[in-house]
Image (tube, coloured by chain):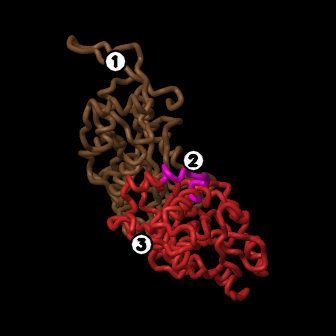
Chain colours: A brown, B red
Amino acid sequence: MPTKHDVERFFSRGHRQYVPHLSVDCVIFGFHDGDLKLLLLKWKNSDIWVLPGGYVRWRESLDAAAHRVLRERTGLRRLYLKQFHAFGGMDRREGDIRRLFATLGVTAPRTAWPLERVVSIGYYALVDFSKVRPKGDYLSDRCEWCPIEVRPRLAFDHDVIATTALDSLRESLDAGTLEASLLPARFTMPELQRLHEAILGRSLDRRNFQKRMLERRVVERLSLRRAGGAHRSPFLYRFAASRSR
Amino acid sequence: MPTKHDVERFFSRGHRQYVPHLSVDCVIFGFHDGDLKLLLLKWKNSDIWVLPGGYVRWRESLDAAAHRVLRERTGLRRLYLKQFHAFGGMDRREGDIRRLFATLGVTAPRTAWPLERVVSIGYYALVDFSKVRPKGDYLSDRCEWCPIEVRPRLAFDHDVIATTALDSLRESLDAGTLEASLLPARFTMPELQRLHEAILGRSLDRRNFQKRMLERRVVERLSLRRAGGAHRSPFLYRFAASRSR
């Protein structure tokens, strides 16, 4: 738990460690129970939800900063990471940061460097839901998966960042290399279809989907079936070797 | 022509006007004489070539900064503009800026803000070559179109930025909306094919190309032919209405 002193020190000295005016924000996608989900943080003593993110250190590339944030929030060292857009409009509502610090009992000095304009580099990450151990940062008391369809409203311009990330993910879906990061090593065709549907936000025809997946040679059928209920035991698939993790 | 005093003033006061550590760089593509070309600047008193770019003002979005740079270098107020990547590695060779100022007779103070790390937001622009009036900035003595295949080596990481822009342009080519920004209102099929070849860096089969373009309904044939030599007068095409500028 950060003390008031810690926060005041961040205001007075943080710009020696971090490049001012520059941050990374991470849209972390996971797939679970048929839903595409986002990993979100809730700030302490408030109902303010945000994307995981952070300032960039002076001796750290943008990609390294994103990996650091992702490692701290998910516990994962390796994941699919893509920079998709830089957000630098005049309407980013940096003023929301005042609300954050107010919840910690700190009134930010009027000229404090974190209150100046910040340009944020957006990254999205695709992770294996089952391997993530969500962990909040020192400003948050919750770090949770939320289905994208029913997520809380996000502070700053983070809803725009999340929506833009989803658009970018959709555009890349045809390449057929992304899904491997979101599914376990073995999966059924209905699970793969449900993932595509969750990303695209619409339902797909079962026969056409299966036909297209097999024609693209992205996945290959194993000789195994999922042990299941009495009525059916669907075949298992995996991503073709050249495209797997 | 900037005086030594102007430059020293930029070092001492520029950070009041511009966000430090943040710039935009613009990869300006034009198509002429069958070549895809880039608009480049040469710094005064040197053989150093760079992409057009600049710092971002405090009260200016990233997009507005890119439009400002593009307007100043090309004279165009409207053009196809796309943000494609943020460059923030540790190997951007900001030290090259010392060489620049040395050519102007100014030794930059060791702690000057323009010598600190800069993250650059990359934009590419597609322009109608015939409408551009190239104009250098106050640091340059030449502003010229160079074919991408035979361009000079660029300072900083600008070669990486230009190459990444070209990759991004190639990925977007299939959408069939980009070419309208690079060609005049009426063009022949061989001109359109040559544009695709220049972007892709390889030759294409004439029959397949024509078939694909017409099937995609991106272009439509006019009842006009280009008046030409004795042997042939090719049909003219234009981009279909819904996709034209």
Mark 1 or mark 3: which is in front?
3
Question: Label 2: which residue?
Answer: A64
Q: Which label is found at residue A19?
A: none
Instruction: Say whether disc 1 or disc 2 marks the residue closer to the N-terminus.
Output: 2
Which residues are drawn in magenta?
Answer: B198-209
Residue A144 located within the stretch drawn in magenta: no
Q: CA distance from mark 1 to mark 2?
A: 39 Å
Which amino acid, by three-letter code, is at mark 2? Ala
Question: Label 1: which residue?
Answer: A235
Which amino acid, by three-letter code, is at mark 1? Phe
Q: Residue at x 33, y 16 (%)?
A: A226
Q: CA distance from mark 2 to mark 3?
A: 56 Å
The N terminus of chain B, quarter of image = bottom right
Tell whether label 3 touches label 2 (CB within 8 Å): no
- Residue found farthest to the front: B230
Position of residue A155 in the picture relative to residue B42 (left or right): left
Q: Residue at x 53, y 62 (%)?
A: B190
Q: Front-most of A210 and A192?
A: A210
Question: Label 3: which residue?
Answer: B224
Please determine whether, in this image, residue A242 is positioned above or below residue B222.
Answer: above
Query: In the rendering, at what x and y percent does residue A100 appear?
Result: 36, 58
Query: In the rendering, at what x and y percent does residue B37 appear?
Result: 61, 67
The C terminus of chain B, quarter of image = bottom left
Q: Residues within 10 Å of mark 2 (few under 14, many from 20)?
A: some
Q: Residues within 10 Å of mark 3 (few under 14, many from 20)?
A: few
Position of residue A51 in the picture relative to residue B152 (left or right): left
Residue B203 located within the stretch drawn in magenta: yes
Q: Chain of mark 1?
A: A
Q: For mark 3, give the secondary structure.
A: strand
Please determine whether, in this image, residue A53 is positioned above or below residue B142.
Answer: above
